[in-house]
Amino acid sequence: MIACMSGPSWSHIRVTLASNRPITAYGGIRLSDEMLDQVVASCLSGETVLNFYHDSSRNAEHKYVSVEILEADDGFKDVWATIAVESKAIAQFEKERVETGGPGGMSLVISTPLQELQSLVTNSEYRMKVSADASYFDAEDIVNASSLLTASGDVEAELLYQFSAEPACRIVVEVIRVRDEAGSWPDVVAFLSPIAGAALVGALRFFLERRKKSVQPGRSEPTIIELKRVVDPDGTQSEIRRITTDDPAVVERSIESLVERIDEGEAFLDWNDDERWWRNQ
């Protein structure tokens, strides 16, 4: 449950972001003390982005007032945070929580490294991070899919953990310009050249072919694919293009058309396959 203390433009919320309790969706794994420390450091440094419902299109302006690790009565440890959040955003979140009967609260998304894969080309202008949810994809499959992108640059393969009751099937491909601090969307056109674009389609097709069934009985939501480009040097802002599908043909169509809208600068676009175009939320 979220407790709010509203101000003129900010609301302060007190929430648990992570815990070292066993996580059922990921086979009962537990975060180590070191990982809990990393969560705290990431929040305090501003690296952690706040999204509602683990939805990258639903972020809000915020700042961490305090983040600390506290031991609960049952002996487990929780990461507690006090966060100042834009009041309108948190009010909308609370309204939706009440309407849907949801539990409220917030949780964290983190990734852990699997393997660093070297580029097949020298002096590449790009490096990439590829992460996929650990409840839907094996580590070996994430590494193999990531290796298909080494024709464009170095690739870091990572496991994605979403600390919620029902983690979504999510794949994130982050493209980072190496030589410039920021760059712009036209800089990514080279990454989406016919060769690199085909490699990206191949990697995403590989993922879709190896996706596991949901750990939640009866759940069959489509895969969420996010293509991210870092906007600022510290990595706290990104431009995101999202494709929601399990159909490789939809992936191919969306990647082919991406260059046509790549220079428009919107922070977030969704692929609409009925219209064969990218759209704002």
Image: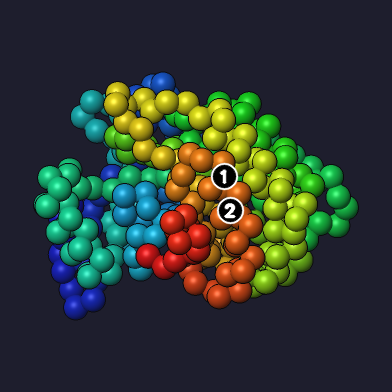
CA separation in Å, label 1 and label 2: 6 Å
> Disc 2 residue type?
Arg
Image location (x, y in percent) of residue 109:
42, 45
* Horizontal relation, residue 98 to residue 87: left or right: left
Cβ atoms at labels 1 and 2 below 8 Å apart: yes
Q: Does 265 appear above or below 240?
A: below
User: In the visual, does 184 lie left or right of 247?
Assistant: right
- Provide the residue designation for mark 2: 253
Tell me the element at label 1: helix
Q: Residues within 10 Å of mark 1 (few under 14, many from 20)?
A: few
> At which x and y percent is residue 238?
53, 63
Amino acid type of the residue that numbered disc 1 sits on in the rendered structure: Ala
Q: Which residue is mark 1?
A: 249
Crowding around mark 2 (Cα neighbors within 10 Å: few <14, some 14 to 19, many 20+) is: some
Can you tell which quarter of the image residue 259 is in?
bottom right
Q: The C terminus lies in which quarter of the figure?
A: bottom left
42 relative to 249 in the view: left or right: left
User: In percent of the image, x 34 and y 65: which residue is there?
Assistant: 60
Residue 73 position within the rendered picture, expressed as x and y whole percent measured from the top left: 21, 29
